[in-house]
Amino acid sequence: MTDPKDQAAREELCCRFQDIVSQYLIRHQSVLDIISKLQEASSRTNRAVVKSITSCGCLQVSAEKQQMPDDISFTQMKEYMDNHLSGRLCEDCREVLEDEIGKTLFYLAALCDVLDLDLSQIMEKELNRMSTLGIFNLR
């Protein structure tokens, strides 16, 4: 079970983050700007993962069709699924990815702010949905 103090601290962090984003988002106030910047940040995150594979080589991908026995239960499926990655992010790639994911979070919080949505409430609802549905969440 989650410690209520830890949960409150995470909720406070999320709220503080959204408040700070609201204060520091100066040039991109239009929802159209925010959406396009969020998409750009997400693309840059994807590109950073690709570059860690193709340029740096700290990660490798070996992908093939996921193989699962026919007689396993739904709850056992995860044991047979592979992320197709090997290796570990080097410090340089980790730093770039953390920066790009941070920008993605920034614009996600900005979108929530401009639409008058509370990011911490959205996260709480999604956590409750995942907890309720468990493995049947199917994501």
Image (cartoon, rainbow, N blue to C red):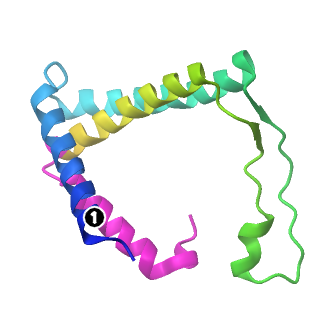
**Residue 69 placement, left or right of 129:** right
In which quadrant of the rendered view does residue 28 lie? top left
Q: Residue at x 66, y 24 (%)?
A: 52
Rendered location of residue 115, percent (x, y) = 16, 47
Q: How many marks?
A: 1
Dot 1: few (<14), some (14–19), or many (≥20) neighbours within 10 Å?
few
Rendered location of residue 86, percent (x, y) = 78, 39
Mark 1, residue position? 7
Q: Residue at x 58, y 76 (%)?
A: 135
Q: Residue at x 72, y 26 (%)?
A: 58
Rendered location of residue 99, percent (x, y) = 42, 26
**Residue 101 placement, left or right of 109:** right
Q: Quadrant of the N terminus?
A: bottom left
Rendered location of residue 35, percent (x, y) = 31, 34
Which residue is more in the foreground, 95 or 43?
95
- Residue sticking out furthest to the left: 23
The three-letter code of the residue at mark 1 reads: Gln
Q: Secondary structure at mark 1?
A: helix
**Residue 46 placement, left or right of 78:** left
Magenta span: predominant SS is helix
In which quadrant of the rendered view does residue 127 lie? bottom left
Q: Which residues are magenta?
A: 113-139
- Residue sticking out furthest to the top: 55
Q: Quadrant of the C terminus?
A: bottom right
